[in-house]
Amino acid sequence: MAAQTTSNGGSPPTRFAVALFPGFQSLDVFGPLDILNLLSKKTPLTLHVLAATLDPVPTGTPITGHTTSQSIVPTRTFADGFEDIDVLLVPGGFGTRITENIAPVLEFIRAAYPKLRFLLTVCTGSAVAAQSGVLDGRRATSNKRSWAWATAQGPKVHWVRQARWVTDGNIWTSSGISAGMDMMYAFVAAQFGEDVAQDIANASEYVRNTDPDVDPFAGEAGNGVGK
């Protein structure tokens, strides 16, 4: 069998990681990760679940207002490095608004990004990436219900409101929550082939949104910072 190549002619990335913090949005993480889990049945992958410590990381915090939440156990800490990571996924969630929660994530993004092949964010994860500075001068999107706050975190970012997801170079950003799944399917299609992505969607009984420019949640406002 011939070696698999991406839409850009390179070899697909196989070393993934997700950066967690208290108050992350569960579907931001588990939606894309389940796609990778199913992909790993066809293509061997590695996945690291990162956090500041090895303590379980909760989806809820005192400010989120949830009466139920879940926790996930990291496999290693940010201090363990990034040399073996091709793709970093950064989720959103109410925890992005708590400075002490995201400080270790910001530091990790700044240090790791020059060595990453790809950076992917879901929902207000793009606000975290924006605060790190790596989105400066780039096109990006975020959760529309948090648009004013998210875009204020990156005044040098070219924010795109009417977008399910946005790709700018090696950075992919998605709109809110479930949009992360559409972005991940598109990423898998670009890196591993459309047939692979669609087969995973069929196995999941998921109907994909395949047009990144169609966002039914963007409202009537035009694109731009602070709108």
Image (cartoon, grey):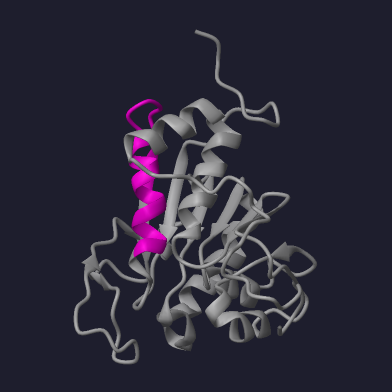
**Residue 62 position in % (x across, y down):** 29, 91
> Is 179 inside the magenta-drawn segment?
no
Give the residue drawn at x 56%, y 43%.
Answer: 186
> Is 29 inside the magenta-drawn segment?
yes
Classify residue 192 as left or right of residue 101. Answer: right
Classify residue 74 as left or right of residue 162. Answer: left
Q: Is residue 170 above or below residue 50?
A: above
Give the residue drawn at x 32%, y 29%.
Answer: 41
Q: Residue furthest bottom?
A: 63
Q: Residue furthest top?
A: 1
Give the residue drawn at x 67%, y 85%.
Answer: 152
**Residue 91 position in % (x across, y down):** 46, 65
Using the image as rendered, state which of residue 60 and residue 148 is in the foreground.
148
The image quadrant where one finds the C terminus is bottom right
Looking at the rendered structure, the number of numbered marks drawn on it comes to 0
**Residue 80 position in % (x across, y down):** 40, 58
Is residue 175 visible in the rendered image? The answer is yes
Give the residue drawn at x 60%, y 86%.
Answer: 149
Classify residue 161 as left or right of residue 185. Answer: right
Q: Main secondary structure of the magenta part?
A: helix
Q: Is residue 45 above or below residue 94?
A: above
Which stretch appears magenta? 27-47
